[in-house]
Image (cartoon, rainbow, N blue to C red):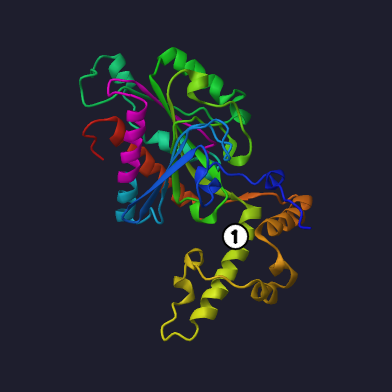
Amino acid sequence: MKHEIDLKKYEIRTDLVADLLSEGKIEGISTSEEQYKAVHVLDVLIYEKNNPLNKRPGRYVTIEFKDVTDKNNAKDVEDVFIKYLKEFLKDENISFDKKALIVGLGNRDSTPDSLGPKVVEDVLVTKYLFDMEEVTPSSDYRNVSCFIPGVMASTGFESRDMIESLVSLGKPDFLIVVDALASSAISRVNQTIQISNTGIHPGSGVGNKRKELSKETLNIPVISIGVPTVIDAIVLVSDTIQFLYQHFSYHMKNINKNKLAPITMIDPSKCEEELTEEEKENLLGHIGSLSEEELQELIYEVLTPIGYHMVVTPKEVDFIVLKLASLIASGINRTLHKNFDN
């Protein structure tokens, strides 16, 4: 009899609700989808505390895209990001006169974890102008302050403890937190922005959860913005094998066509054809006969004992993180201030 496999024990990490959703209706959860040109949006509302995803009740918006290095595509992504960020402010009844604190979580010295600090560096800070009464709440600018707490290994302090102190001192009306996340899908790494009103655990993207930042712990609304910049090596190897199946399936079923797309133009994740179990076994032997769960179990058993249970990131992550940080910072500025000029 086939044994049950508990993937939780393999510590495969994801911070994205979109990674956890399976096809079909899930009790306590409602979903809707929208398409804006090449940008896909998944809007998830979790309204029951005890839900199959084991996530905090609230709203999760996942914005999926392809290439933010393309100027036109980046503009479309930013417009969609602004649209939904404004909706979150509206959901939390946050008016224009409310003060904002923007926090960039992460380690600026570690490229995949530097998204938060890089975003905050480009956010327009106006609190000091309000303090000096050079601008007033009736102007086109909102009262905005920023903070980069760093990481506990460098400061010795919990991020939440420092943020709690700032909240007590500056009395912002709401908090926007930006952080790098982890995904369990190759297709979403550096190609997804998740916005949520449920708070965040600093360090969760690399499996090092600290004290949470949420409305329950800080007593003000907390909107979290995250981009998955890393993926577990176990999932990477497993997905690569699945893409290999789809690649061979596409060529086997289309080899007799007059025009077969060049290999470099094929997105294996978009190939719906699948190999039969016999074809998989002929291709990869015993490994081809394993289910996806069994394959992940095997990869875990091979990699972990020799110390290779890693999270990995694309080689161009430094360039992509800069582009994403600029996009998110611009989106925050355009959302929080009126008539903001890029």
Q: Position of residue 315 (x, y in %)?
A: 53, 56
Q: Position of residue 170 (x, y in %)?
A: 41, 15
| Residue 292 image-quadrant placement | bottom right
| Residue 49 image-quadrant placement | top right
Q: Amino acid at mark 1?
A: Asp
Q: Write the residue at 25% across / 26% down.
A: 141
* Residue 250 falls within the magenta-colored stretch: no
Q: Quadrant of the C terminus?
A: top left
Q: Write the residue at 51% across / 37% down.
A: 28
Q: Write the residue at 41% across / 33% down.
A: 120
Compared with 166, 260 (above or below) is below
Q: Nearer the viewer, residue 60 or 264?
A: 60
Q: Nearer the viewer, residue 22 or 64?
A: 22
Mark 1 residue element: helix
Whether residue 315 is visible = no
- The residue at which mark 1 appears reads as 239
Q: Write the residue at 51% across / 27% down.
A: 149
Q: Position of residue 204 (x, y in %)?
A: 59, 36
Q: Position of residue 181 (x, y in %)?
A: 53, 42
* Residue 88 falls within the magenta-colored stretch: yes
Q: Nearer the viewer, residue 154 or 236?
A: 236
* Magenta span: 79-108
Callout count: 1
